[in-house]
Image (cartoon, rainbow, N blue to C red):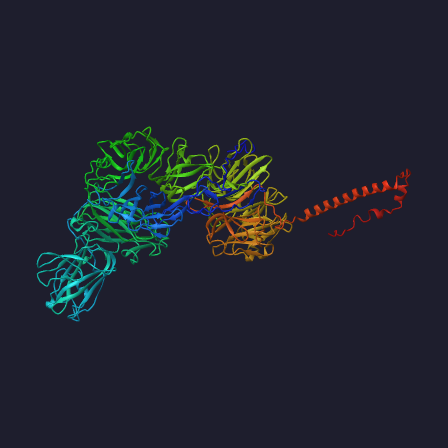
Amino acid sequence: MRLSSLFGPTAAEFAFLIQLWPIMNLIRLTQGVNYTPVPAPDLDLSKLGQVALTGDFDSISLYTYEQQSENAFATNGTQALITQLPNGDFATTAAADGYIKALCPFTMSNGKLAGVIVGGNFTELSGTPAQGIAMYDVTSGDITPLDGLNGTVNAILCDQDTNTVYVGGQFSGANSTNAVAWVGMSGWANLPFEGFNGPVNSIIMEPNGNIIFGGSFTGLGNSTTVMPDQLDQQVINIASANISSSSNSSTPGFDNPSNVICKTNGDDGPGNTWLLEDNSPGWWRADMNFGYEPSLLRVWNTHQDGRGTQTFRFTAIPIDGIMNFTYTDPDTGVEGHCDALCPLSSQTTVPYQDFRFINTVGMSAFRIDISAWYGQGGGLDGIELFQNGKFDSRLHLESSLILLDIFAYAVNTSNEPGCANIQYGSNSTATGPWTVTPSLQSNSEYLSANLIGPGVSTDGVSVTFEPDIKQKGNYSVTMFTPGCIQDNTCSTRGIVNVTGTYAADSASGPPTQTTIYQTNNYDKYDLIYQGPVDASSDSFRATVTLAALAGQQDGVTLVAQRVQFNLTDTTGGLNGLYEFNPNANTTGSNFSSSAIDSAGMGLNAGATITTIQVLNNMTYVGGNFSNQDAGFENIFSIESGNSTALPNGGLNAEVSSMIPYADLLFIGGNFTNTMNGSVPGLNNIAMFNTTSQTWEALGAGVSGAVDSIVSLTVNITTDQPEVCISVNGFFEEILATGSSKAISVAGFAIWVPTQQNWLQNLNLQSPAISGQLSAMTNVTGSSTLLAGTLSSQDLSAEDAVSLTPNPLGINALKVGIQPQQIGPVTRKRAISGQNTTGVVTGLFYNNAGVNVTVLGGAFTATATNGTAIDNLAFLNNTGSNPGIVSGLPAGLDSDSTFLALATTGTVLYAGGTVTGNVNNAPVNGLIVYDMGLASYSYPQPPAFGGIDVAVNAITIRPTKSEIYVGGNFATAGSLGCPAVCVFRNGAWNQPGNELGGSVSAFAWQGDNQLLAGGNLTINNNATTLATYDTSKTEWTALDAASNVPGPVTALGPADDVASKFWVAGKSTNGSAFLMYYDGSQFMSIGDSLGKETTILGLSVLHLGKNHENNGLVPYNMILLVTGQLSLPSFGNVSAALFNGTTFSPFILSTSGNGPGSISKLFSANGVTFQSAGGHMAVGFVVLIALACALGAIFLLVVAGIFIERYRRKHEGYTQAPTSYFDKTSNMGRIPPEHLFGRLGGSREPPML
């Protein structure tokens, strides 16, 4: 389009000033959380006019609180407790090594806040080991682990009246499963029903005080029984153990303790029997590389030569505890008990004896001590251990509750031994670079795969577990993951995809997939399946495959340890819902009296309840279920004891999360419409109006499943924070609706109820927030506490902002720059070894009332008229209609990148890696554009030539119409003109012939000398800085440049003639350098910046308040360093202020889910310098001295007049003579040479 109205009426930039100093006090501070304000830098920008910052960012903040950062949100499955800063940003207060799923303020009945209960699948919170649950002190930040649970906590309810915390999830502990209570500060207490036989997902209190539990269970913990078809189904592998013994027989063939392993025939003889020395006690020991909980010991006694063991004891290691057994006496058939003296029969008709463990005890080794013997000494023919059939320790022995646990290990030596001749023994197969890792602090050895190095990828890296399932039934399947601290892999742990196949018929048990993040610091386990599992057969084996998730970065570490199959009951009188009366002393098995329990039983078998909410005395239940009789699916309500379908039959797929807001319910899940399909736009997120009983769409919804909905406060405007609704899940877009286009998001979107629109759709300058939230809670006397992982900055802005003084603030420059898409960007170009995106450079054109901002770089924007703009944009703020955005006419390649801009009059010189065809002629490196005519100048300068042509710097010679262009090129048209070329009078000219290499930056040292920095050569001698004398047309290397450790990429003058300046770049070792030239030598700042630092811009600015004097920065000025900086004491920043001794964070930014960068600061007026002491230039001193002299003369004359008048008054008046002498005759007496003879002579300077 033409820029026809560039100097006519245009629209003003929409300026929404984020005033961060003085500090906003919109949000109440969290009690006890120390928000430390940062003193505002007293920058004096008043003489610069308009000021702007360019870079590669999509969000930006001024640094106002020490808790701010550029940290990305976590994508490795870890979350944290999050609080909100007074400026609206979010800060982490306590990091976890896994998910946080529930929060609850534990306020005691006396009104005292004990802390916030935090639940999830973490193993550590804020550096404190905590298995799934802990208490967070909002005053001190201390973490108190609530030890005693093993597993994952999904739901928490705090009851202030009874000082009770109800906890639900998938765990065991305190003699309960999946539900338990924490009472007061005394600890865990079993609920009367001792939990459930399946996971709990939601807990809520009804108005009548009853507690509702929702989940995937069918019975209570104290009434659910399941009897395996066969006890002790799994053989513990002793064959792979390290076997040792004492007092071995000296008889060959009988002295090896390994003789008794895998021997089940009871035959005596050499190689089959292990004997002790005659008449000597002894012991036999097995040390495994895995842990186990045996349920049965089987012992074959020897009868070799009349010998045999009479009594023994079994010691569990490492606890060194003597085990208690029950056994059947083979002589009498009577059941007995034993511990330290367990008897063995000497009858040859007794092949073996079984000893059942009374207590379930974990061990990794055991020892059998033989204390008495038959004949001449003791010995054994065989030993076997079994597990899986054990009494539940929660119940009395006579209740006969049996639990069946079957394990499959990644390390095959921990699986059932091959010598046991088991038809479908547990085993595993591994593909990829797996190695065995010692158990360390974990339960067993495990496999590790370090996917590091050339040619290593995640493809085909997997472990497949095959359990020995002997009994078809309903199982819960759990994946165990060893912690990362023990093997020092926390920084590289990756993500795995777990696929399970559990049934021969896919219709009855389709394969399932689960993603598991392996970043846990300590051992954890995840429930990956609950449902039917078929028994092993010749045609089917249940399998669980752990595989590397595709698309992970190089260098990840994966681990695989074991899978557990636990047989559970399917019939217990419940179906996902249970109502508990805390005032009742007992619980019964008659659930029909409860409307809640009955509502669950009316659902389809295997219903899953994921979320429950109570709003206006109505209970709403969501999940994955249906009720064909009542005609609803996945959501219903309960009121006055009746289950009621919501309008239109509910929703057509699973509901995962609900939260109330006023009289509305926000509902998320995997649905697309109501059950009858009558309300379009309900894609994965919906709003239900409980007053009007109607469904409402949130725009057109989002493109994927919603996992959680969490409310949070957002500063929609500077003076009014609003409660908004965050939508979190597995989606990539906010779907298009009406005039609103689809918006790319990374699983996080914010709905603004007052605007009835997505925040991302609103034309407001608002905070930038990205990440995931999983839970929130309000704490009395404190701010809201959130759980999740967030990255936030004060302002959502793309690549360019203005900087305003008094108070210091930032505005987004409304140029319509489009967000960069995640993944490869085709318009990126490699420049100086780096990928360049965003706005690189800019300038203000202010002349004759015209106000235009020009931005150049590598970006895509949308013009005011809706057309696309590539890489160079004009923002016209002139006249009564400011804010008009336009771009260049067609002709340039879309992947061009602009790196340097300059103007003379209305003519713009724009350079970079610019290619295309303008006015039917090719261009390369530079274009010339007439802003007044809104067209390319004709003709264009001849194109640059060379390899990887790039124009990096353009400057106009003071007082001359000469354009100096620097960069990486060899020719300008047909003219040889490497590194620097001058455009004068419509033609290229080579300034001297000594220079070569590549120029990155310019600075004029007066009117006639140009300083250039880069990777240069002078007469083929390498240098980083050179000066050009325009009068001599000669380049000279700066003498001190040899002390600069690498090519100069940024240059900032430190006085008016750049005789002093700052330089920055990358050293040959890859680290960043920053140095000051004082006119004779360079001074380095040392190692004040991290190695990852990249400096892109340097600007010396005035201060309103002086700092302490030093030899680098005058005390009335400060150095602004921009780029992507790493401050060792802080972290990443995009801009920092350096006072000569210390770096202070100034601006933080992010781009995508990572640190952003600031390219440069540009302003309408240049910086003027004066000495730090306040002394003025000599010219000003002379003028002031002259004025003082004239003033003194005037005063002397006036004084003389008064004195003369006074004299005359006292001496009397005398009339002046009226005749004059002949002046002409006197003049004629003076020789002419006395008048003019010395005018042409030399004069000595005046003495000052």
Residue 1002 seen anywhere in this rendered image of the structure: yes
Q: Position of residue 150 (x, y in %)?
A: 28, 50
Q: Can you tell which quarter of the image residue 246 is in?
A: bottom left
Residue at left offset 88%, top offset 44% = 1227
Q: Residue furthest front?
A: 110
Q: How many marks?
A: 0
Q: Could you say which is closer to the camera, residue 824 or residue 1216?
A: 1216
Compared with 869, 152 (above or below) is below
Position of 1201 with respect to 896 (left or right) is right
Compared to residue 1022, the image places residue 625 above or below, namely above
675 or 789, which is in the foreground?
789
Coordinates of residue 222 in the picture (x, y in percent)? 20, 45
Q: Is residue 655 left or right of residue 605?
A: right
Q: Quadrant of residue 646?
A: top left
- Residue 105 percent coordinates (x, y): 35, 43
Q: Can residue 901 be spotted in the picture?
A: no
Tell which residue pokes out farthest to the top in this image.
Answer: 692
Between residue 91 and residue 732, name the one nearer to us. 91
Residue 137 location (% of width, % of height): 38, 47
